Image (spheres, coloured by chain):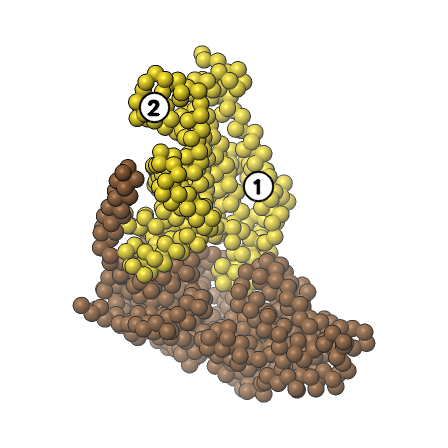
Chain colours: A yellow, B brown
Amino acid sequence: MLRMLSWRLCALVPSIVLLSFVVFLALHLIPGDPAVAYLSASQLPITEEAIERVTIELGLDRTVWEQYASWVSSALTMDFGTSYMTGEPVIEEFLFYFPATVELSVWAFLIVILSVIGLGSASAYYRKTWVDYSSRLFSIVGASLPSFWLGFLLLYVFSMSLGIFPSGNRGTVAHYVLPVLTLAIPYIAIYSRLFRTSLLEVEKLPWMSHARARGLSEKTIWLKFQLRHGVLALLPVLGIVMGYLLAGTFIVENIFSWPGVGRYMMNAIVQRDYPVIQFYILVIACLFLLINLIVDLLQAWLDPRQRHQKGGVKHV
Amino acid sequence: MIKRTYLFTGMLLFVLIAACSNGNVKSESDELVIAWPQDIGAMDPRGYGASQMFAQNLIFESLVQYNAEGEIEPLLAEDWQQSEDGKTTTFYLREDVQFSDGSPFNADDVKANFDKVLDNRERHAWLELANQLQEVNVIDEYTVELTLSEAYYPLFEELALVRPFRIAKEVDGQYVGTGVYELEQHDRDERAVFSGNEHYWSDSPDVDRLVVQVIPDSESRMMALDNGEIDLVYGNGLLSMDAIQYFEDQEGFTVNQSNPQATRTAVLNTNRGPLEELSVRQAFIHSFNTNQVVEDVFYGTEEPATALFGDHVPYMPSVDPYDFDSNRAEQLLEEAGWNLGEDGFRVKDGKHLSLSYVYDANDAIQRTIGEWLQQGASQVGISVQLEGVDNQAYLNAQKSGEFDVIYQETWGAPYDPHAFVSSMRIPAHADYQAQLGLEKKTEIDEMIDQVFIATEESKRTDLYDEILQEIHDQAVYLPISYTSTIAVYHEGISGVEFAPIPYEFQLEKVQKNAPDA
């Protein structure tokens, strides 16, 4: 187990180094000049001299290689540069905005898990009844609505027309409802169907007949076997969902004026704030890798069969 | 059964949470809440980038200010005197001014602030005054003297700008100012709360607290205004045209617009293709139905433009506008030898009368204007290709002159006309590129050089007359409309006024009546 963990952690390093390089290169290839963006955000006249001055100030007059080398050398000391727009250290700004995003994602994640298990098992248990059909309808609609549209729809109904929930910003519990729902609904829609399917697949497995033959009650079979295996199948998926939720808050944060990293990143893209974009992508990539790792470990722990597969890693 | 329990619990939860919010999302009556698309940024009087000008203006004051008539009037300086040669100006400061922390304001503060600008001259070099200013001398406690390297007439206009020549004092790492408001609370990217400066030397704001709520999305802003979370949306481009139309029809809301500010124009490149010919440029302008565009695109929220600058801009001579007149346009083109081809577009010497219109593809208004240009021009046999490009490419086209027609706005007060005209001499500007084909381009540039050092008002007026008349006669700019700042607000809000400078919001005059009930 420990060997597997350390091996996997070591394997992360080259991926991250490669990624940082690719991102760096890609950033400099996309059209758009940070100096021009800076000037126009400052409402300064965009003249040749001004562009030149800002370019030098931002250190963009060096070659891409020099810039990358200096980025790497300072990154090794945990200095990821300063934002072009605010002049503040990127890492501090990121840490300032990140908690808001985590709050939003964690709430959405909990709602997703509960709803997926609830809705999925309800529609598997009561399959081919109105419960199943209405959950299917919900899934189709929920999965096909683009999230910006869903967000505006919720905002229109619950904030503008009914005036129940505020239109954005943080504050009370009520402020969480609409953004969390907007974030969660598409995932509930997709994964509740998936969960239903995996529950029904368990049904066909031979040990289900075995359990029935042993005379166990339907309730015990449902809880101890079917649901448990269904949840196990859901685990790796949930890990990915958490990653998506953390990285996919751009639109929701923008609509609901949520001060999180998604919006921070969005502004950075518009303003070509390279150090910010670079750091954000790196962190999100690391998060994905870590979440995957955690899910794998969790699975191995829950399901003994996996421990003895892949890479011949044995129980030590 | 299970399902029903779930449903019930879910609904109960929802209702509970809704109850927590009391169904009351409206703003408090003792504070004025406005929406702004981004955080106000660092409140440093000399900060650029993320620092928002309107917020800097709330806190920091300048020596002189620009009034509604476009004239300079006293602010922190009560009076001033200029030397014969125009190089030295002595300012006499108000003696009753305090910073918001209670410390007194005097000539040393002026020197300290201006010296900081000079320490970073490069950063502020975009403003000619930063280059012209040589020395700041404290004569006595309330007298300060500025020495310039030349007699530079826009001295006062540039001192009035929101940055960088404003007065602040650093207290515990924070800047405090002498302005109407002080920053009370700042939750980054959420809200900023300003409260009336209790040491203010003039009238305090009517509503003591001003809350700036950050709402990045324009539709969300609209909904927040509609349900009463926001009292007032004030500023350019903060609401979509459709939203403005909606509030105009809605009872309980007022839509108010400022006087004309900047001008939306299409710049015609006199140095490229068919537009090298004056008659083609004139015909193109005649083909554009400005009034219709203002009505259909801006729903009447902007005024149709008749020239590069409107009458409200200082030194703008009165000129004969190129009215919408398709017949005149056709006649001009016929006379110039451009005859209709089989496809309905004109041809001359085997060349097609086809123009490219370059615009920023992310800007819906620029695109719509392109479509109107295209439609009008096609009526008289000019074909227009719409080239929507990303922001960067758009700026590059301005720099390189690789366009026939390009969308551009003037800078508004107080930059119009002097700073805008000044930039016509700079190769990185679309104006310079577009004017290159003019016979008199060198003369125009020389006149611009002179206008800034002319000490006599009459000479300056003559020079501006000549420059702006020539540019108008040569049909370099297709005037579209004059932008204005728009304010949309709830019933009960009154006293919403506009300053001539787009980023000077006069929020201190806004009143808020307690809501009914």
Residue B254's spot in the image, x, y percent? 34, 74
Q: Is residue A142 above or below residue B180?
A: above
Amino acid type shown at disc 2:
Ile
Label 2 secondary element: helix
Asked whether residue A295 appears in the rendered view, the answer is: no
The residue positioned 25% from the left and 67% from the top of the image is B207
Q: Nearer the viewer, residue A298 or B111?
A: A298
> Residue B439, image x and y in percent?
72, 79
- In percent of width and height, residue A288 lies at 48, 34
Residue furthest toward the top? Answer: A316
The reply to whether residue B218 is visible in this rendering is: yes
Mark with earlier residue (2, 1): 1
Residue A251 % position (x, y): 44, 50
Task: Classify B82 as above or below A51.
Answer: below
The quadrant in which the N terminus of chain B is found is top left
Question: Which residue in the protein does label 1 denote?
Answer: A23
Q: CA distance from mark 2 to mark 1?
A: 50 Å
Q: Secondary structure at mark 1?
A: helix
Q: Quadrant of residue A35?
A: bottom right
Q: Which residue is mark 2?
A: A221
Q: Write down the chain letter for disc 1.
A: A
Please name whichever residue, B367 or A70, is drawn nearer the observer in this view of the structure.
B367
- Tell me the crowding category of disc 1: few under 14, some 14 to 19, or many 20 or more residues within 10 angstroms, Cα based: some
Q: Residues within 10 Å of mark 2 (few under 14, many from 20)?
A: some
Name the one closer to the observer, B403 or A89.
Answer: B403
Q: Kindly give the residue lying farthest to the right in the view shown.
A: B349
User: Does label 1 lie on the same chain as label 2?
Assistant: yes
Looking at the picture, which amino acid does disc 1 mark? Val
Q: Hey, which quadrant is residue B515 in on the image?
A: bottom left
Report the side of B127 relative to B8 (left or right): right
Above or below, B276 relative to A237: below
